[in-house]
Amino acid sequence: MFKRILIANRGEIALRVIRACKEMGIETVAIYSEADRGAQYLELADEAYCVGPARSADSYLKVDRVISAAEVGNVQAIHPGYGFLSENAHFNEICRTCKIDFIGPSPEAMRRLGDKNEAKQIARAANVPCVPGSEGLITDEAQALKIAHEIGYPVLIKATAGGGGKGMRVAQNDLTLKSGLQQAQTEAQAAFGNPAVYLEKYVEEPRHVEVQIIADHHGNVVHLWERDCSMQRRHQKVVEESPAPNLNPEIRRAICEAAVRLIREANYTNAGTVEFIVDKHGNFYFIEVNARIQVEHPVTELVTGIDLIKQQIRVAAGEPLPFRQEDIKQTGCAIECRINAEDPAKNFMPCPGKITQLYVPGGYGVRFDSHAHAGYTVPPTYDSMIGKLLVHQPTRELAIACMLRALDELRIEGIKTTVPRLKDILGHAAFGAGKVDTKFIERTWPA
């Protein structure tokens, strides 16, 4: 087992990894930018090193500085968390070249699955359903028009690299396809340094269902059931839950087994998430693999009782998984609400600033994962998420009631947050009935 780990991240996920390591008797080395200097969670690490100024491109994304901190800190492994360098195959490779274990999949598996076009090829080889579309990348406008006419409008233009909705456009006809193609390529080049896109049939009113998996270096691959992440705004998840409501047990089993097949085909190890869309007829299609821990991983932890961060570390250290597929059960219902420093009344405008008061809800089955505290200043430089409010109850009805109570109890003063909109969502009849799709927020509360 590792004796010392560097956490190549910040905020909530850095604190989450520090806590897991402390319970495992592992020392931790944290890194921080000038914007995060003095953050309270850094005091919980055994050592902390500044890696640059506020801009992530000059600090958290600086591979040489992160590696230097790891070498000065004398660590055996690096946990990348989510975001930043977590899905950077080049960084993964450099870690291993420097004889530092990367807590995640191999660079090769990360590279193959990070390219959405190649990931779809792997999925097809594993007999996993994919959305009809181009067999490869789109090379010109004429090819795009030909494929769109074959599969029928509407179609979705998607960047082969990256995520978060960047390089993605929906086209309803030839005119919007031509303009959308150019826009998507330009946006993908700016965001990921790769303008390549592909085309697929746009599934209307889709649900977003993802499967948590973990695989060790001894040939064991298991799924930890599914999460429903349909409640999104501009392709960013807002509310997540497990089990997915109104999902036929046969489809649940099939989607989870498909995720395991794909992961085996990719020769993937460590934790990851296989994402699918499910149409209104119950058909499911592969979207992509997130080769890292997800923001919403605690939802799975609550319903399975398995600490995913600890399992990531153990797998990276070469230990076999301590459980088999038949040992993993879904118990009760868990819901997560992402608490962002944004003003929903002003089209979710970011609201950085000082938190003057923070009162955290409690009670049976309530969990709040956050690095924020009274007196903490939310910087304008990074993602606006300041915490994750989670509940776990025996039934979905009880979980919704508990979450509404917890949201009402949560007090964050000094800045605007998304709590009012989250109350609207959890109290909406459609959410209560489990009848939502990925466009529900935009339809119900237009900007």
Image (cartoon, rainbow, N blue to C red):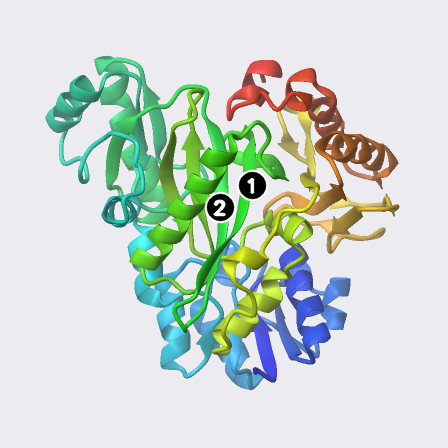
* SS of the residue under disc 1: strand
Q: Residue drawn 71% across and 67% down? A: 19
66 with respect to 45 (left or right): left
Identify which residue, 5 or 273, lies in the foreground: 273
As drawn, the label of residue 211 is 2
Q: Which residue is mark 1?
A: 227
Residue 377 locus on image (x, y percent): 75, 50
Along the line of sight, the residue nearer the viewer: 23 or 415? 23
Q: Residue 419: x and y, percent?
A: 75, 32
In which quadrant of the rendered image does the N terminus lie?
A: bottom right
At 34% across and 51% down in the image, what residue appears?
A: 262
Cβ atoms at labels 2 and 1 below 8 Å apart: yes
Q: In this view of the protein, can residue 99 be seen by the observer?
A: yes
Q: In screen coordinates, is 179 left or right of 295?
A: left
- Residue 85 at least partly seen: no
Q: Quadrant of the C terminus?
A: top right
x and y percentages locating residue 322 in the rendered image: 56, 70
Return the disc, 2 or 1, that comes first in the chain's sequence.
2
- The answer to which of 110 and 392 lies nearer the viewer is 392
- In this rendering, the answer to whether 436 lies above or below 296 is above
Marks 2/1: CA–CA distance: 6 Å
Q: Using residue 116 as the reference point, say whether residue 68 is left or right of it.
A: right
Alpha-carbon neighbours of circle 2 within 10 Å: few (<14), some, or many (≥20)?
Answer: many
Q: Nearer the viewer, residue 347 or 405?
A: 405
Identity, as a three-letter code, of the amino acid under mark 1 = Arg
Image: 158 above or below 96: above
Q: Residue at x 50, y 78 (%)?
A: 317
